[in-house]
Structure formats: structure tokens, C-alpha cells
Amino acid sequence: MVSNASWLISEKVFTMFIGLFTTALIARYFGPEQFGLFNYALAFVTLFTAISSLGLETFVVKELVDKEYEEGTIVFSSFILRLISGSILTALTVGVINIIEPNDRILHLIVLILSLSMVFKAFEVIKFWMHRYQLGKTLTIVRIIVYVFFSLLKVFVVLFDGDLFHYALLFLIDAVIFGITLVIVYFNIRNSKSRLSFSFSFARNILSKSWYIILSGLMATLYMRVDQVMLGSMIENTRELGIYSAAVRVAEMWYFIPMAIITSFKPVIMEYKNLNNNKYHETLIKLYSVMLWVGIVVGVVIILFSKIIINILYGADFTKASSILTISVWAGTFGMLGTARSTWLISENLQKYNLAFMSVGMIINIILNLILIPKIGGYGAAIATLIAQIYVALIGALFFKTTRIATKMMLKAINPKRMLN
């Protein structure tokens, strides 16, 4: 588990540094206003991407652990489901943006290109298969190779005076190349030779379980991205959104650490659920402890060096982003605690509660954005997201007797000995 997480973290460290450099280069090149327009389109598409994933990641891993269906059936059926959902949601995304922003043709084109990535992300079900078998090393090598190519293309956009259309096209190219590479790797390293086949039984079974996760993912994305969508629609000048997006990008740059750890803990926790209840709960508390203390360390570092980080990466035009960053970074800590808890909810077949937490969190975020954005702009959006994250991660579970234990485990995780053990 540690080895697998180490590989996944190594990949993210590598791509983080390259990503920070290239994103900063792009932000400086386009400036706050155009950078804000692009992030408005990206945030809008992300709302629909959350649905296209169908919440399959955790369930595919669980099905591969439980072995109720053949491996080839699980992988191929999941791929077909993602392919269908991606195609439908691409059309829906384009249709909705044409309705709410009827006169912005540039925005329509960017949204169309970014939306097409959802179709090719169907190949990412192979990532879930790799997570099941702790193939972090293989996945890391694949992702690094593709990401380096993607980053070089970003530099070329700047060197050859590209526009937002060319920049958006890179995201589609990245999805296509990564998907094809995953397929090649899968057929070369898989041990099981079970036939790839589609099962309506598996599809019905997985969708009957995952619709809570689909809606929860949508709600999570809404309260994580609705701030950018609302900033873009409520404030005519996209400069404020560009500055806010720059802060959010830096605030999210450390997410790869907890996500890699959660990914590696997930199959272990699910196996302990079936084998040893004490180890199951103890491992969950350790996971929460790691999430909490990594978040605290990152938050303190960001507060101390936010101005330096923003000035180095983005320049004087984005100075305001440093203050927004000191607020936004804490939302990630609570967000990762909530993500870690999802593994417990699914193991206990309580995923419906996640939908309740996310729904209320989204409502809180939207209401606070409506109140705060007109008054304090990006600062208000950051505060709204932080409060919503605190509710979803800690407070929401207290309202249900069945889920109250999750918050109790998180409170136990405050003791750093849990992590050190």
C-alpha cells in the first residue's frame, strides 16, 4: 500500500511542478480576463463531468475485490457505461451553454472542445483496474509520459501565439492520448484472460448502487465549482474570476497527496471490512489522521508564503489572489476528509447519506455565494466554499445516528499518534 501510494505521489509531484510552471505561463500569456473566461468554461464543463463518471471508481474496485463478475465483464461493461454517459453529457453541456450564454460564440466553442474529453475519459476505467491491483508504478509511468507531452504543447501555444481555442484543444488531445495508452498497457500486462463482454446484469447492478454516488459527485462538484460559475455569471468582468481561479489552482496543487493515499487505502479498507472489523476501523482512523495533518501542514505553509508563491507564478497582475489563497487552501483539508469518508460509506452501503451531505453543502454554498460575491467578490466565493466543506466533512454526519460514528472517528484522528502509528 505504501509502495503504491509512493508511486502515485511521485507522479503527482512531478506533474505538479510542471503543471504549476505551464499554468502560470498560460495565465501570464492570456492575462486575468481571458484566463478567467477559459476557467469559466472549464468550471461549467466540470459540473457535467462529475455525472459522466457515474461514480464508478470505487464500485469498480469493490467489484474486482468481491469477484462476483469476471474481470473482463467488469472492465468492459464499465467502459461502455462511461462511453454512453460521456456522449450524452457532451451534447447536454453544449446545449445548456448555448441557452444560458446565447451570444458568446467563443465560449460555445471552448465548451464543445472541453466537453468532448468526457467521451474519451471512458478509457479511465482501466485506471480503476490498476488501483485494484496496486499498479501505481505502471500508472505513474504512463501518466508522466503523457503529461510531459501535454505540457510541451502548452508551451508551444505560447511560443506560436495560440489562442484559447488551441489551448482548449490540448485538453481533448490529452484525454485521447492517455486513453489509448491505457488500453495498450492493459492488454499487455493483465494476467486474467477473461473475455471482454458487456453484461446488462452488471450494468443494472452497478447503476442501482452508484446513482447515490453520481448525485453525490454532482453535488460535490457543484459546491466545489459553482463558485467559479457564479463569479463568471454574476460579475461581468472575467478578471475577478481569473484572479480567483489562479488562487484555486494553487490551493488545489497539493490534492494529489491525499488522493494518492486514499486510492491506496481503499482496497485495503474494503478487504479489512470482510476480514477484521478492528483493523477496518483502525485503518479508517489512520486514514483520517493522515488527511487532517497533511492538510494542516500545507495550510500553514501556504499562509506563510502565499504572496511569494502568487508573485513568482503569476506576477503582479494576480497579487490579489494571495489573500484568496489563504482562505481557499483550508477548504481542501475538509474536502479530503469527506473524500476519505466516502470509502467507509460505500463499504457500509451507506452512500445515500453522502448525497444528503453534498446536497445541503451545495445549497449552503450557493446561498452564501449569492450573499457574499456581490459584496466582496472572490473573497466571498472562497469563504462560501470553505463553510460548505466544513459542513459536508464534519457537521452533516452528526444529524444521522447511522453516520455519527464517522465524525467521531475523525475527531479521534486529531491525535497525531494515529498517523505516526
Image (spheres, rainbow, N blue to C red):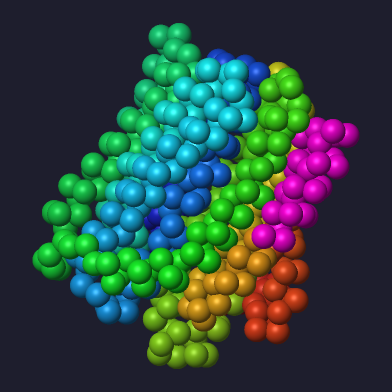
Q: Is residue 85 visible?
A: yes
Residue lying at the far top of the rendered structure: 161
Which x, y percent locates residue 70?
Answer: 21, 72
Residue at (66, 43) in percent of width and height: 226
Q: Is residue 368 magenta?
A: yes
Against 52, residue 130 (above or below) is below
Q: Is residue 200 magenta?
A: no
Which x, y percent locates residue 264?
Answer: 42, 66
Who is closer to the viewer here, 212 or 92?
92
Most frequent secondary structure within the magenta stretch: helix
Residue lying at the far right of the rendered structure: 375
Which image quarter: residue 353?
Answer: bottom right
Which x, y percent locates residue 311?
Answer: 68, 25
Q: Which residues are magenta?
A: 359-387
Against 361, residue 168 (above or below) is above
Residue at (41, 66) in percent of width and height: 207
51 with respect to 353 (left or right): left
Against 412, residue 91 (above or below) is above
Residue at (81, 47) in percent of width and height: 368
